[in-house]
């Protein structure tokens, strides 16, 4: 997991730590340090994070860096882009979705409203089987 990672600075340290705990990951001194480093400045690869962390905590190893990056990606705090930065955890909730109707009128729905509508319809159609909608992703149109 070298360059190509991105963690957007809109997520704070406590939110990331809470997400890690919620998903069953241990919150260690090393992970706290790595999150602080990533919040302070964008890093383009694990090696860069390692050298910055090594200045603060001499015993930290590359395996810790990689495991932490994998954990952050798994909880959704890390995305593949150009540098490691914290993601905005409610980026989806801020999205507005446009639905164009056949008469060319347009409805604008926020993420929560769209999720509620979809969940209600999916439940009525028998798709959910007692489950709830966790995430809605926008997929860009192919040209």
Image (cartoon, helix red, strand yellow):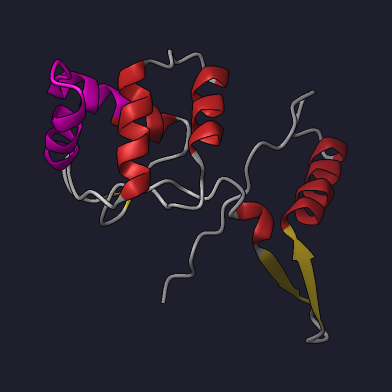
Residue 73 at x, y = what percent? 38, 35
Magenta region, mostly helix, strand or loop? helix
**Which residue is at the front of the view, 90 or 54?**
54
Residue 84 at x, y = what percent? 30, 47
Q: Quadrant of the N terminus?
A: top left
Q: Is residue 37 magenta?
A: no
Residue 130 at x, y = what percent? 79, 23
- In the picture as drawn, the residue positioned furthest to the bottom comes out as 104
Q: Is residue 41 left or right of residue 9?
A: left
Q: Quadrant of the C terminus?
A: bottom left
Q: Residue at x 69, y 67 (%)?
A: 96
Q: Residue at x 14, y 24 (%)?
A: 62
- In the picture as drawn, the residue positioned furthest to the front comes out as 56
Q: Is residue 49 magenta?
A: yes
**Which residue is at the front of the view, 117 or 15?**
15
Q: Is residue 54 left or right of residue 138?
A: left
Say whether residue 132 is visible: yes
Say whether residue 70 is visible: no
Q: Residue at x 56, y 35 (%)?
A: 15
Q: Is residue 98 left or right of residue 25?
A: right
Task: Write the start and end of the magenta stretch as one range.
Answer: 46-68
Q: Residue at x 77, y 55 (%)?
A: 114
Residue 103 at x, y = what percent? 83, 86
Q: Quadrant of residue 65?
A: top left
Q: Is residue 103 left or right of residue 89?
A: right
Q: Quadrant of residue 99?
A: bottom right
């Amino acid at each position: 997991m070298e360059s190509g990672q991105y963690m957007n600075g809109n997520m704070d340290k406590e939110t990331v730590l809470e997400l890690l705990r919620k998903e069953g990951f241990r919150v260690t001194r090393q992970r706290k340090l790595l999150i602080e480093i990533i919040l302070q400045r964008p890093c383009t690869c694990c090696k860069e994070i390692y050298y910055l962390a090594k200045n603060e905590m001499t015993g930290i190893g590359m395996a810790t860096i990689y495991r932490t990056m994998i954990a952050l990606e798994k909880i959704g705090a890390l995305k593949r882009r150009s540098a490691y930065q914290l993601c905005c955890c409610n980026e989806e909730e801020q999205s507005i979705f446009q639905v164009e109707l056949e008469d060319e009128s347009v409805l604008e729905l926020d993420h929560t409203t769209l999720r509620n509508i979809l969940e209600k319809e999916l439940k009525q159609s028998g798709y959910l089987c007692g489950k709830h909608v966790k995430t809605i992703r926008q997929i860009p149109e192919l040209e």
